[in-house]
Structures are given as structure tokens and as C-alpha cells.
Image (tube, rainbow, N blue to C red):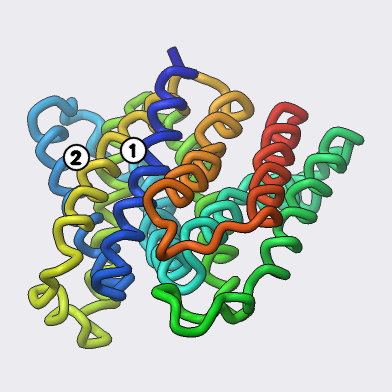
Amino acid sequence: MSILFALIATFGHAFDSFFARRGLVETPAPMAAAFITLTINFLFFAILSFLFLPRHLLRLDLVYVFIIAGLMAPGFARVCSYKGLETLGMSIASPITNSDCLFTVTLAVIFLGEPLTLPLAVGIAGVVTGVILLSYETGKGKKGSITREFKRRYLFYPFGAALLYASSVFLRKVGLGMTGSPLLGATFTSGTSWFVVALVMMGSGQMKGVFHIRRGLVYFLIAGIVGCITWLALFQALHLGRVSVVTPIAGSYCLVTLLLSMIFLRGVERITGKIIASTLMIVGGVIIISLAR
């Protein structure tokens, strides 16, 4: 059953990125997009929690891990992810964000003393090679196209998202082990992220811009609705199954985003043989790393 939920999360992540990308083409406002989608997520889970969540679970010693996870992702991670979609496009940003498992393994090897086995080394090599190829592809966009010219500094956004997602997923698993409630985890993680993004937007004076979004609003709303389904599926998959099984399945969504880009975003996305090969290498490396842990 965990595999089924992980597959749902895979397609959910892909369509979330797709609709967010469509919205960002119409209205290039990643902070506003993150706020809109997170608002939908938080309201959805808050209503579900009010109806179905046992009140005895609402204790700080049970939810603090989810609060910390929410500070990392989807809050700041989604902002970085959407900014990467805006500046680099879905075909390049999604595979790099998809390399979050590389950060998880690296942290484990450095700080937890876990052994660096041959399968892990092969997987890391695949991810690193794929990311280098994608980095090489940036800066080659044609001027005058719908997608702005690529700059290598834009790589900070998907890399930052990957690091934040990796740390957050680890904490979510810890929290689920303490509470056994995917709904509790989804509610407090999304709620914390919404609060952080709202504070940042109010502090920077960007909140007014949310109420003036018109052209891309429908796409952002759809992305938020899809995100609700994705979150439920991912938390349920993490609760029922092992991270080493769930992660490679849920993390293969960049293959779906690549396919969506090739079919629906030909006028926006730049798809080359190197981008396709890089995506396959990253996904293959993620699978090897996850199964080798």
C-alpha cells in the first residue's frame, strides 16, 4: 500500500510543478505562488484536523518536530523550488530539486558515520554527473524566447530546495515515528510553512501583490489543490513504508515533469538530449542511493 501512495505522490509532485510553472509563465511571482498554494494546503489540512484529528495529539512535545520540518519545507523549499521553475524552467529545475536524497546521504556519511558503500558511491556519481550536465546546459537559452535567459546563479534555487526538502523529509519520518498520524504531520508542517511565508511576504511588502494576480491565479489554485493530495499521499506512504522504498518512487517525479514539458510546454521549455540524459542519470542515481541505504 505504501508503494501505491508513493506513486500518487509522484504524479502529484509532477502536476504540482507543471501547473505552478504554467502560472509562473503568466505571472512571474514565485513568492505569491508559494503563498497561494500553501494557503490552500493549510486550510485543507486544518479542516480535516478539526473534523478527524484526536485532540490528545495536540501537544507540543509531539508536534515540535513537524514545526521544525515545516520551517524548512514546503515553506522556504517551495519558494526556492518555484523560483527555480521561474528562472530555469521545469525541465532543468525539477531534476536538480529531485536530487535531495544526495544531501540526505552526504549528511549521514559525514555526521552519523554511515559507511560509503560502492552502490552509494555509484548512485552519488550518477546524481552529481546529471547535475553537472544540467548546470552546463544553463546559459544556453535563446534570447527572445518565452523563458528568460538562463544564468548559472539560478542553480542556487533548486539546490536550496533539494537541501531543505531532504532535511524536512528526515524530520517528518522522525515525527511520524513519535505520533503515527500523517494528518497531524501534514497540518503542522503546512501550517508552519504558511506562517513563515506569510511573515516574509508581509515584511517585504509583497503581500499586496497576491490580490492583484489574475492571469496565473487559476494555475496556482490548481497546483495548491494537487498539492493537498500529494501531501496526504506522501505522509501516508512515509507512515506505512520505509523511507528507502518510498523516497525513490516519490522522487522520480522529474521523469513525469520532463514528459509534461515535452508535450505541453514546448514553447516555454527547452528540451535537449543532454537534459533528458541528465534527468535519467539523476533519477537512476536517486534510486540506487535510496535502495543502498
Query: Residue flagged by tag 1: what amino acid is it?
Result: Trp
Evaluate if marks 2 and 1 touch, with contact meaning CB atoms under 8 Å apart: yes
Task: Tell me where residue 153 appears, x and y as whole percent.
Answer: 60, 80
Q: Which residue is mark 1?
A: 231
Q: Which residue is mark 2?
A: 45
249 vs 26, nearest the viewer:
26
Q: Split into 4 quadrants, where in the image is the N terminus?
A: top left
Task: Tell me where residue 287 appears, x and y as whole percent.
Answer: 68, 33
Q: Is residue 211 above or below residue 247?
A: below
Residue 76 shows in this picture: no
Residue at image position (44%, 77%) is 145
Residue at image position (52%, 54%) is 94
**Left or right of residue 158: residue 49:** left
Which residue in the rendered view is the most extreme toward the bottom?
205
Residue 269 shows in this picture: yes
Pointer 1: residues within 10 angstroms few (<14), some, or many (20+)?
many
Task: Tell me where residue 76 appears, x and y as whole percent.
Answer: 41, 65
Task: Tell me where residue 41 appears, x and y as whole percent.
Answer: 22, 47
Residue at image position (47%, 46%) is 257
Question: What kind of element bears circle 2?
Answer: helix
Q: Is residue 283 above or below residue 214?
A: above
Q: Using the numbered discs, state the Cα–Cα distance from disc 2 to disc 1 in whole angstroms.
A: 10 Å
Give the mark, 2 or 1, whose residue is nearer the N terminus. 2
Residue at image position (39%, 74%) is 146
Q: Is residue 37 above or below residue 46?
A: below
Query: Residue flagged by tag 2: what amino acid is it?
Result: Phe
In the figure, residue 66 lies in which quadrant? top left
Labelled disc at residue 216: none
Q: Is residue 226 above or below residue 2?
A: below
